[in-house]
């Protein structure tokens, strides 16, 4: 059900909405003050568990539970670190940037509370280098908070020191993967690490660390203010422990693309038609629900969940567009919620070219450490190139599936699955279109991604 | 060694070092600092960074070559990156890129003869809702029309 909210985005349209005075006018920093003013760590973690904040970075892990994994009590010789993931590189995803640009103090306040919750005194916010305005706004917020005595040795007069720093990458999608990010933070090549050890045991600089997505940490003050349970109950999927409200993005072939804040439980239909203004240039063909690593859904897909135990049972037989967007509901659909930023394809766009575009991305971004990923992503792209050039045979579609299958489970990090799963998704959902494309050398298809007349009048 | 940071950047370097528990962690920010001054990361700069941070030159080279935003050769005065990933591609990125190539008279990866602009493609720049888009130096230009692109490129080639 569509219920729009204004927790993170209330000042998005105000010219100075990102400033400290605007943030404090709306009650900002009260929760950090309350926490450092004597809340126990146990009480904080319990409240965060009750909030059912599922990680907003893609994997959907419960944030409060993740905080509770940190070794306790912290040992003086092993300082803890809070690391915030603002690499925002997953194609289709553009939500964290809006928070950094328009509500950076929510991030700083979240970091203060998060540091206290995990026993850290230092937080690093890892921002991809290209986002210059985001970095500027975060540094600005940090400096403003520092000048007010909210950061430093004695925040809010307490003796719990907190420092927050912005760290930048230098252009590599893989650095969004949390262990690659940690290497990058340490000044190394952004290559993922083998797990275990998990970051809670050995993370940044070999010390116990928690990695949270930027939106995950930014919503913490809101959840605390409402109380964890009340926050969780905003969501239609509270019973699935998927709570609160979050940012949803929609891009591609919609009339009013953008980032919208709403209670968890919104459906794709509402995201595309009510918030995204409907499909432009044709009818809805398909939608990638939450960033390019999530397998694609067709507009005509129906839910098949006859088993009462399935989280999808209430929607059995209905359109996938009417399933509430949640971590478990979308996993059960065979795709993922991911970053909750959907990419919409109208029927004027060619699904073969869409897959070609994404597979070029993955080939380009594989860090090269694991052979199945490096070679597999290159091989998939080569075949896609041949298909698009009209040189492939139908049998090569099976080859594509085999290569993708061989990547699954054979890599250090989830980049491999993030490449293979969407590939398999396209091949499964559009098998007929792929076959026709190959047989007719592309004539069966609009053979374009951009809508006709996109740049009206100009030669395309 | 002849490379040196400006005094202003030198004090910025000291501030960067104070953020981390060790000096290696400053590798990427310091490489950015050097590139900001020099336009690209030369062999000499990599050695200078290694020396200043007390780490091996091989490490610095390994890092500089891993990340696409470090220029390993001289580039134009202005950097243009056209995003070509899916949301932008669904909204005209290909046509926009070709338009840039024609207008500038270079292929992707190339620099105009007068050295004013280097044209490159980028992967998703987190502006998918404002597609098509391109980044010019530090700024994002979003919801672009071809006429917008002309205005932007003309300004760059004149400056
Ligand atoms: C290839 C790859 C890229 C990722 N990129 C991002 C990213 O840009 N931002 C992000 O928050 N998480 C990203 N993740 C997920 C992180 O590894 C990690 O799960 C997340 O930062 C944890 O935060 P959360 O629990 O708050 O979601 C990526 C994962 C993989 C495998
Ligand atoms: S696809 Fe171009 S900014 Fe995301």
Image: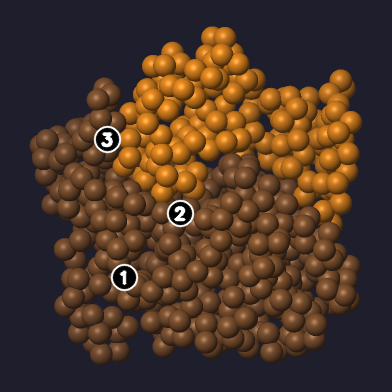
Above-or-below relation of A197 to A455: below
Q: Answer above or below: position of A401 versus B63.
A: below
Query: Circle 3 is placed at which residue position?
Result: A454
Nearest to viewer (mark 2 / mark 1) = 1
Ligand 1 under 8 Å from disc 2 Cβ: yes
Q: Is residue A382 visible?
A: no
Residue B45 sits in which quadrant? top right
The chain letter corresponding to brown is A
Most distant residue in the top direction: B113
Could you tell me how far apart the alpha carbons at marks 2 and 1 are, in whole angstroms? 18 Å
Chain at numbered mark 3 = A
Q: Report if the beta carbon of the residue with label 3 is closer than 8 angstroms to ligand 2.
A: no
Q: Quick one: SS at disc 1? A: loop
The residue mark sitting in front, 2 or 3, is: 3
Task: State the residue in front, A251 or A416.
Answer: A251
| Residue A305 x/y as whole percent | 23, 81
Q: Position of residue A386 (x, y in %)?
A: 26, 35
Residue B90 lies left or right of residue B51; in this view the side is left
Specify whether disc 2 shares its chain with disc 1: yes
The answer to which of B60 and A46 lies nearer the viewer is A46
Name the residue tied to disc 2: A93
In which quadrant is the N terminus of chain A drawn? bottom left
Q: Quadrant of residue A264?
A: bottom left
Residue at x-position 67% and y-position 36%: B64
The crowd level at tag 1 (other Cα within 10 Å; few <14, some 14-19, many 20+) is: some
């Amino acid at each position: 059900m569509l219920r729009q909210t204004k927790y993170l985005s209330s000042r998005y349209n105000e010219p100075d909405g990102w400033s400290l005075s605007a943030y404090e006018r709306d009650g900002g920093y009260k929760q950090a003050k309350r926490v450092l003013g004597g809340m126990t760590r146990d009480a904080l973690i319990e409240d965060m568990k009750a909030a059912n904040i599922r990680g907003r970075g893609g994997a959907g892990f419960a944030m409060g539970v993740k905080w509770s994994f940190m070794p306790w009590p912290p040992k003086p010789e092993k300082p803890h670190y809070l690391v915030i993931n603002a690499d925002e590189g997953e194609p289709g995803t553009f939500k964290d940037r809006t928070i950094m640009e328009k509500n950076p103090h929510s991030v700083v306040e979240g970091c203060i509370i998060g540091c206290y919750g995990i026993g850290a005194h230092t937080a690093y916010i890892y921002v991809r280098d290209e986002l210059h305005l985001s970095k500027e706004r975060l540094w600005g917020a940090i400096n403003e908070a520092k000048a007010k005595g909210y950061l430093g040795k004695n925040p809010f007069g307490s003796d719990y020191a907190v420092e927050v720093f912005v760290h930048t990458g230098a252009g590599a999608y893989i650095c969004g993967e949390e262990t690659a990010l940690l290497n990058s933070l340490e000044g190394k090549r952004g290559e993922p690490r083998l797990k275990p050890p998990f970051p809670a045991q050995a993370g940044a600089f070999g010390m116990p660390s928690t990695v949270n997505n930027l939106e995950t940490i930014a919503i913490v003050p809101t959840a605390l203010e409402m109380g964890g349970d009340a926050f969780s109950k905003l969501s239609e999927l509270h019973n699935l422990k998927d709570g609160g409200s979050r940012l949803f993005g929609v891009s591609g072939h919609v009339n009013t693309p953008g980032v919208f804040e709403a209670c968890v439980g919104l459906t794709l239909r509402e995201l595309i038609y009510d918030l995204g203004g409907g499909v432009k240039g044709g009818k809805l063909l398909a939608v990638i629900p939450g960033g390019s690593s999530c397998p694609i859904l067709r507009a005509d897909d129906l839910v098949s969940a006859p088993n009462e135990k399935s989280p999808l049972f209430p929607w059995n037989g209905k359109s996938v567009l009417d399933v509430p967007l949640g971590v478990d509901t979308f996993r059960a659909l065979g795709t993922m919620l991911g970053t909750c930023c959907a990419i919409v394809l109208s029927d004027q766009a060619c699904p073969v070219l869409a897959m070609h575009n994404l597979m070029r991305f993955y080939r380009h971004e594989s860090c090269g450490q694991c052979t199945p990923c490096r070679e597999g992503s290159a091989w998939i792209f080569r075949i896609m190139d041949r298909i698009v050039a009209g040189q492939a045979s139908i049998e090569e579609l099976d080859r594509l599936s085999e290569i993708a299958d061989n990547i699954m489970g054979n890599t250090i990090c989830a980049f491999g699955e993030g490449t293979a799963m969407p590939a398999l998704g396209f091949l499964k959902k559009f098998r007929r279109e792929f076959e026709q494309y190959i047989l007719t050398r592309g004539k069966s298809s609009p053979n374009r991604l951009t809508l006709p007349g996109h740049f009206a009048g100009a030669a395309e | 060694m002849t490379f040196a940071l400006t005094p202003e950047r030198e004090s910025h370097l000291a501030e960067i070092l104070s953020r981390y528990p060790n000096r290696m962690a400053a590798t990427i920010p310091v490489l950015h600092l050097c590139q900001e001054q020099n336009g690209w990361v030369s062999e000499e700069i990599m050695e200078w960074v290694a020396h200043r941070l007390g780490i091996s030159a091989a490490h610095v080279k390994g890092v500089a070559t891993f990340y696409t935003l470090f220029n390993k050769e001289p580039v134009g005065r202005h950097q243009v990156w056209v995003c070509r990933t899916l949301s932008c591609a669904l909204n005209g990125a290909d046509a926009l890129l070709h338009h840039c190539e024609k207008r500038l008279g270079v292929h992707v990866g190339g620099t105009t003869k007068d050295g004013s602009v280097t044209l490159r493609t980028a992967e998703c720049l987190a502006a998918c809702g404002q597609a098509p888009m391109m980044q010019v130096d530090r700024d994002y230009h979003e919801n672009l029309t071809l006429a917008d692109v002309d205005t932007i490129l003309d300004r760059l080639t004149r400056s």
